Image (cartoon, rainbow, N blue to C red):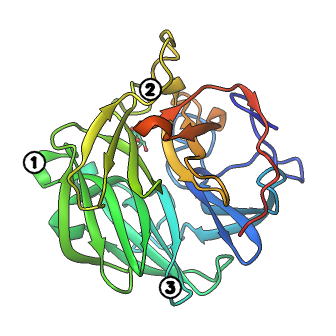
Amino acid sequence: MIVNGSPWFDVAGQRINAFCGGVIPADGWWWWYGSHYGDGPRGNLAEVGITLYRSRDLAAWERVGTILPVQPHFEHDLHRGCRLERPKIIRHPDGRFVMWFHLVKPGCSHHSAAAGVAEAAHIEGPWSYVGSFQPDGFMLRDMTLLDAGGGEAYVIYAGGRQCRWNRTLHVSLLARDWLGTSGAWTFALPERMTEAPAITRLNGRFWLLGSGCTGWNPNRLRSAVADHPLGPWYELGDPCAPNIEPPDALGYRCQPANIVTIPGWVDRAVLMADRWCAEDHGQNRHIWLPFSVAGGRPRMSWSECWTLPLVRPP
Ligand code: GAL
């Protein structure tokens, strides 16, 4: 049973601490990974790293551990106190797991916002940190990855040149090893300051959700569709079911994190989102909602309590 708005616990009774990440099936398990957030207003600064849980049914989650821990050495990109946000993991056709995330090194300004990249032969690790860079010379902030099939993958990120902040969502085709970008990229939703991108392929089209740019505060969500990841992208407006009054009209007070496709589901999926608590990140909440593209439009609807049917990982 999904109870949105309440803290969620793993099978050991500990709070699940894996925010702005995703869920991926592999080797007979569902794997839920995300950023660990601490307590208090500075709990967004990484003190732990990227955590991993596993489940057979998307309901009972067992903590596996920290797969990409922060590092004690000040020179290391992942030094304790960095910002290590919105990790995404996809699996390369050669079997490797590849992780990208939004990295701001400790003590550095938002202008240094870059992609951090890591890879592993097994999702439980050990993970090797590959490095950090600004793809195609752009800052990279809120981001997600798309495995488009056939060995093609994309990074979708809020970015811009130094003076342009994160005004425009970029879509970049990854290099063949998925550890860098290929040089082929496009703009999606230019000058819209879209953050918190989440993307999926359903009914043969690519569907994008995002938020506006108001830091930890909620705002109205937006959506877009394209027939190819490199566009053109068409903006489709607020995906939240109509007739919701403020404050819940503001994206149900959460930001998208990831869209999880489920075997056998044709035009629906599960939206993973985060409800932030800027005063105390120990109070952040996981929000999972039904997502559909029926009728040619993406839709999320609010359910405080709902049950996912038992779905085994493919
Ligand atoms: C949000 C972003 C979050 C976090 C926050 C910090 O816009 O989506 O991931 O970076 O800003 O203010």
State the SS at label 3. Answer: loop
Question: Left or right: 309 with respect to 66?
Answer: right
Residue at 33% from the left image edge and 58% from the top image edge: 156
State the SS at label 2. Answer: loop
Query: Which quarter of the rendered picture does the C terminus lie within?
Result: bottom right
From the viewer's perspective, is the residue at label 1 or at label 2 nearer?
2
For badge 2, the amino acid type reads Pro
Residue at 53% from the left image edge and 24% from the top image edge: 252
Question: Left or right: 233 with respect to 308?
Answer: left
What is the distance, in whole Å, between disc 3 and disc 2 at their CAs? 37 Å
Query: Which quarter of the rendered picture does the N terminus lie within?
Result: top right
Residue marked by disc 1: 163
Identify the disc placed on residue 218: 2
In the picture shown, does residue 164 fall above or below 139?
Answer: above
For badge 1, the amino acid type reads Cys
Q: Quadrant of residue 148?
A: bottom left
Residue at 41% from the left image edge and 39% from the top image edge: 296
